[in-house]
Amino acid sequence: MPLDSESRWRLVRLLKAKPAPVESSIDDLSVRKATESDLTQICEIYNYYVINSVVTFDIEKTTVEFWKDKLSYLSDLGLPFIVAATQAGHVQGFAYLAPWRQKAAYRRTVEDTIYLRPAAIGKRLGTRLLTELIELAKQSGVKEIVAVISDKGADPSIALHEAFGFKRQGHLGKVGFKFNRWLGTILMQKSL
């Protein structure tokens, strides 16, 4: 059942209420390649969504070792994994591109992923990260970017992708089960 407007804003306020180290302005953040020293914070940000939301279909917390393997895998493929961090090194968000599918014919198609620390939501950090991802995708020879977005509770992600010219290509209903309810995904695509 979709969240009504009041419930959605209550969720956004709850996410923003969680304390996190944030400098005075998102403009002061640097967007750079992720490093192994960022992985603990990346894991923390992602696991927040694992246990508190349906925007990821993971149901168990990830580990730093999982993220270390992902960083190495994407680096070996020449695909970007970036973070937005404060001068003091506090990661406020991360984003990466990963292969859409494993078969060779899909090699120029990727899926994007973006997660923000709850305190960074609503400050246009997702816009900065997606801007950088698209530029890095072009440099990497990517031709198509696919976004797979939960059909429940992810309206800001859908709006972000639409603002960048992603088009809705389909809806897969009831493909995930989390928190005792069925969830679907919305497929969006952008050609470069």
Image (cartoon, grey):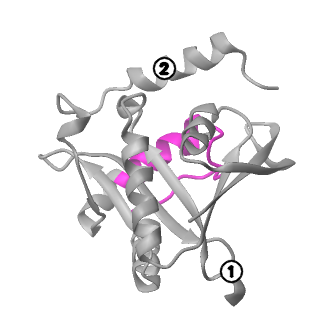
Q: Is 89 placed above or below 156 here?
A: below
- Magenta-colored span: 42-64
Q: Residue at x 59, y 35 (%)?
A: 159
Residue 117's disc number: none
Residue furthest to the left: 88
Left or right side of 24 for 47: right
Label 1, label 2: how many angstroms apart (C-alpha)?
39 Å
Residue 75: x and y, percent?
A: 39, 79
Residue furthest to the right: 173
Sequence order check, earlier mark of 1 and 2: 2
Give the residue type that dot 2 points to.
Leu
Answer whether residue 4 is visible to the viewer in this image.
yes
Answer whether residue 65 is visible to the viewer in this image.
no
- Per the image, the residue denoted by label 2 is 14
Query: Pointer 2: residues within 10 angstroms few (<14), some, or many (20+)?
Result: few
- Quarter holding the N terminus is top right
SS for callout 1: helix
Residue 164 is one of the magenta-drawn residues: no
Give the residue type that dot 1 points to.
Tyr
- Quarter holding the C terminus is bottom right
Residue 143: x and y, percent?
A: 59, 73
- Per the image, the residue denoted by label 1 is 106
